[in-house]
Image: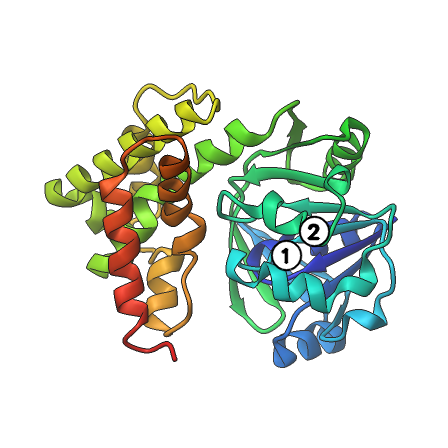
Amino acid sequence: MTVGILGAGALGCTYGGYLHDAGESAHLIDVWDKHVEEINQNGLTITSGADERVVTPRATTDPDEVGVVDTLFVLVKATQTREALSNAAGVVGPETTVVTLQNGLKNVEILSEQVAEHQIVSGSTMVGATVTGPGSVRLYRVADTVVGGDDADRAREVVSLLEQTPLPASMVADPRAAIWSKQLVNVAVKPTAALTELPNGALVASEHVLSVMDQLLSETREVAAAAGIALDESDPLDRVIDACERTSEKHSSMLVDIEQERETEIDHINGTVAEYGASHGVATPYNDLVTALVHGKEATYLD
């Protein structure tokens, strides 16, 4: 099977590298020239614990070199989805399955502007990885990937693909609950990290920050319920605390975006909670506030 990976960041390299190692024809598509050159010249190094392997997927900055693929994993930041998919339109045919495992709550809606909705498989992953340099990625957490979609056969095919790798995968009839469940962590951690500039462990060590996180979570769960999305967690704050304590020295990706003066995903996370809240008559003052404040920080460096 021919697999395209749109966005060769940490997750893109992990999925693409392992799929290539499993015998699939994987093509990494990214805009980082040095990263692409290193992969093509010396291979992609994936480190997981004591295991280090070098795999040799093809990498390119030009999607037209790839041609139409059977399956396309879209793993760019949510803010880049429209442009990236438009630039890579030539890799998507009428039978291509397009998979999103991105952060954010509107990925299917954005993809469906350019791809038929029955071709889209969406879901969430708790796999944790980081790019350590050009052509190199470190996997620090192996966890389940959950997918589903309008076309159950396509979702099963994605699970079968991933089952060839060390990354476990499963299928659900409706992936929205899995997507929103993961975003509970992001809703609480990402904006508070961006605004306080604290690493994850310090965030949850502060009672003041925890109080804000709790309000963000409460609003998000109320919005999800109003939208008909059943979340089964009684106290997601415990999961947020556990996740932050396990990555205590790590800077959340939204804080990294602020530090590196990039556009953040705030509109696709807390901003979307506020948007859904408005459409369902649920007040979201905390999500409104953090969205506005993160935009205020962005305004100090974005044109």
Horizontal side of residue 285 vs 224, given as left or right: left
In this view, 43 is above or below 233:
below
Real-space Cα separation, disc 2 to disc 1, in angstroms: 8 Å
Q: Quadrant of residue 226?
A: top left
**What's the image's color scheme?**
rainbow
Question: Can residue 101 be seen here?
Answer: no
Q: Tell me which label, 2 or 1, sits earlier in the chain.
A: 1
Crowdedness near tag 2: few (<14), some (14–19) or many (≥20) residues, C-alpha within 10 Å: many
Q: How many marks?
A: 2
In this view, 300 is above or below 229:
below
Task: Please name the amino acid that badge 1 sits on.
Answer: Gly
Residue 11 versus residue 267: which sits nearer the camera?
A: 267
Q: Which residue is mark 2?
A: 73
Percent from the top left, x then y, of residue 179? Answer: 52, 35
Q: Secondary structure at mark 2?
A: strand
Percent from the top left, x then y, of residue 142? Answer: 55, 40
| Placement of the C terminus among the 4 image quadrants | bottom left
Horizontal side of residue 189 vs 161, given as left or right: left
Percent from the top left, x then y, of residue 159? Answer: 73, 34
Q: Which residue is mark 1?
A: 12
Q: Residue at x 16, y 38 (%)?
A: 211
Residue 52 versus residue 57: which sits nearer the camera?
A: 57
Q: Which numbered circle lies on residue 167? A: none
Horizontal side of residue 57 vs 166, given as left or right: right
Q: Cβ–Cβ below 8 Å for labels 2 and 1?
A: yes
* Mark 2 or 1: the one toward you: 2
Horizontal side of residue 258 vs 43, given as left or right: left
